[in-house]
Amino acid sequence: MKALLQRRPLVIAGPCSAETEEQVMETALRLKATGKVHALRAGIWKPRTRPGNFEGVGVQGLPWLQKAAAATGLPFGVEVATARQLEDALRHEADFVWIGARTTANPFSVQEVADALKGLALPVLIKNPVNPDMELWTGALERVMKAGITQVALIHRGFSAYGQTDFRNAPMWQLAIEMKRRFPALPFLIDPSHICGNRHLLQEVMQNAIDLDYDGLIIESHRDPDQAWSDASQQITPERLTQMLDGIVWRKEEVLSEEQHLHLQKLRSQIDRLDDELLRLLHDRMKISEQIGEYKKEHNITILQTERWNQILERVCRNGERAGLSKEFITQYYDAIHMESIKHQDAIMNAHE
């Protein structure tokens, strides 16, 4: 199984939930027929946000996956959230397991699974936590690795975000990129199904991930998606999966020629100079904020001036749009600047004289 996580690109696919033996077997055989899938997946225990939804068939579905794996020659994996679930999965010869987003968010649950993993030579995939918390994701990885697990991969499945977005779980690519920076040696997979929550965004998200040098994907595929018992809108048929995989431009890391290296270096040098200039401008801006803080302190004026902040945000978003920058980016960027400015003013206004 060590070879599984060494594949590039690695494609893991299967239904969101194992529903019936027939459904699991047919889906698996059709995925095998694509010639593009390297491992099977299916939900056995389905932790749902609210009770009353389909929560999986439980242990009875594991023999179905065993049979599908035997019929296709493909390894299979399931999500586990407790030591008992891990024990059940291994008793039915699961080839790998993954820790889901809700479990990653709970260090107690992660530790329980990690303790049960001790002494095993089993590939373990770890999804990001539901909320955008890098330390929880890092902590889950560290707990699993301290249990002696050396075959580990990370799964980016998006993060819960307040307000309406096009995605079920916002990608927040910057957090995934930071995780890749922290652990560059680990395989990194995209879970476009849970990021998108629908079929029409899958291709775009998959391509974005490959362009960012992800190592593959774990995706939900069902023999009849519209009739799926869970998350029907985000699943696709094996045949549609083939079309999407064929539509991806697979990027490769290749040795650059001297000419290519020099060209990239020239462009990167320009970015470095611009970054230095941005930092100088931010420094100057904070100095002016400090002067404003001195004035507010002298005249007993509150730090936060909501009307002024709304005016700034409206102006920069308008100008940013003209410059081809998204409103989302400008808002996040200036929110960070605004908070830093508030910190500088607060330090001055509450300084002990």
Image: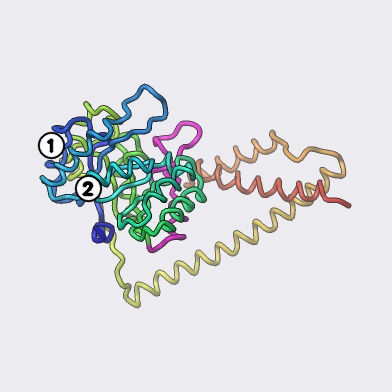
* Crowding near the residue tagged with mark 1, few <14, some 14–19, many ≥20 C-alpha atoms within 10 Å: some
* Crowding near the residue tagged with mark 2, few <14, some 14–19, many ≥20 C-alpha atoms within 10 Å: some
Q: Residue at x 19, y 49 (%)?
A: 37
- Residue 191 in the magenta stretch? The answer is no
The span shown in magenta is: 157-185
Residue 229 drawn at (x, y percent): 26, 27
- The foreground one among 29 and 349 is 29
Tell me which amino acid carries mark 2.
Glu
Tell me which amino acid carries mark 1.
Glu
- Residue furthest to the right in view is 353
| Dominant secondary structure, magenta | loop
Residue 40 drawn at (x, y percent): 21, 45
- The foreground one among 268 and 15 is 15
Residue identifier under label 2: 93
Which structural element holds mark 2? loop
Q: Quadrant of the N terminus?
A: bottom left
Residue identifier under label 1: 26
